[in-house]
Amino acid sequence: MRVIRWLAPLAILGAFVLPACAATPVGSVRVAFDRDGTTDTQSQGFADVAARRAISADDPVRVASISKLVTAIGAMRLVEQGKLDLDADLSPLLGWRLRHPVFPDAPITLRLLLSHRAGLTDAAGYWKVPLDGALRDITDDPRAWDDAHAPGTFFRYANLDFPIVASAMERATGERFDRLMQRLVFAPLKIEACFNWESCSPETARRAVVQYDRAGAPVYDDLRGRKPECAVIRSTKRDCDLSQWTPGRNGAMFSPQGGLRISANGLARIGRMLLRDGELDGVRLLSPASVRTMMQPHWTYTPDNGLTVEEDASGQSRSGFFCRYGLAVQTLATKLDGCRDDPFGDGVERSGHAGAAYGLLSGLWLDRTSGKGVVYFATGVEDAPPGAHSAFTQVEETLARGER
């Protein structure tokens, strides 16, 4: 059954009435779905407060780290095509030496990067690489590496992993990452989406969801009806000439770790494809084996093998947030001491990814046993308080469960 509900943009009239101590989102959307289609859509608040534009499930938003899961889908397509290898040393492909300075004999592979076990950290940065810069300047910095743990032995969530993945994808194909993702993922699934706006249409940009800080001021994607003049970090000369792009030199350019702009309905299509073992509407995007490889945990928490919290300040997770992780896929409801990774509160195992940045919280979660899933996001919740029963926030717990 397909049930669509549009909810009035005023918080006092809408759904998702958060507990009295919780931050009230500027805008929020929740889409529930199963293998066959959407089952429920709820939206509340504004996509753009200044324009008084109500939010909808078709409006594109910067979904933060859910971008990693979508980037991994593109990478797995290249693995299936034989253009990437999950377990090969990436240095020859990249054209520069990618090695842990303390453990130089350990090769860094795509599997290790996608599962955050490559030994990298975000201490040297991961996204402020100028248009004419090189990503290797970051990975050559000793601060980019965890001195205490060899690659493959420790889980440490690091955004830097994914610009390296994007660099490898570019080197394997000779295509710019944002355009490559259009060809590999968005066009086959008939989704209007893009990384960092450059490859989205002007019509899509006009529906952009603005993101707000704790004071209600716009902090991201206040586009005012048009695409940005420069969708990437400008060069050291302050120009934005994308003809300077060279395959694999700067995989951070289009923000593969967090810069995906996509609607909740678009993410629901990706969720349905994964629930259907890689196929949607007659289009086979991934093999069932590739979906299983992504979904199965490559790391499960023990007290000495990883960190259960994101260290980047933009996140809002707490200890116990990560306890199982596959290839850019988090598994929830881990029944181990120290794990508080169940925002739904029902003990059901779900797979997907969370996102948090610039006052936004988001989630894409799939119950592969029942064949059901949910996508949600909320903006303007930089100060969202801790959750009542998990390491997620109250806002995420409320949206996960679909409470009103």
Image (cartoon, grey):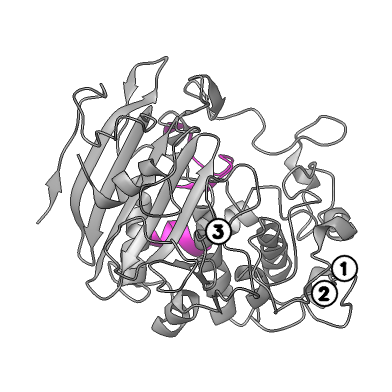
Q: In front here: 378 or 192?
A: 378
Closest to the observer, 158 or 259: 158
Q: Position of residue 339 (x, y in %)?
A: 47, 66
**Residue 86: x %, y % from top left:** 64, 80
**Pair 2/3: label in front:** 3
Q: Residue at (87%, 68%) from the top-left corner?
A: 96
Give me the C-alpha separation between circle 3 and circle 1. 23 Å
Image: 376 above or below 248: above
Nearest the viewer among 75 and 143 is 143
Q: Looking at numbered disc 3 in the image, what kind of residue is underneath it?
A: Lys
Residue ID at (28%, 61%): 373
SS of the residue under disc 2: helix
- Quadrant holding the C terminus: top left
Give me the residue at 76% from left, 42% from top.
128
For the residues marked 2 and 3, what is the alpha-carbon distance in whole angstroms?
Answer: 21 Å
Q: Is residue 226 above or below residue 399?
A: above
- The residue at which mark 3 appears reads as 68
Residue that badge 1 annotates: 96
Q: Label 1 neighbourhood size at 10 Å, few (<14), some (14-19), many (20+)? A: few
Give left or right: position of 33 versus 206: left
Local packing at callout 3 (Cα closer than 10 Å; few below 14, some 14-19, many 20+) is many
Whether residue 265 is visible: no
Look at the image and give the residue range highlighted in magenta. 184-203
**What's the amino acid at mark 2?**
Ser
SS type, badge 1: loop
Q: Are marks 2 and 3 in contact (CB under 8 Å)?
A: no
Seen in the picture, residue 55 relative to 275 is either above or below; the reply is above
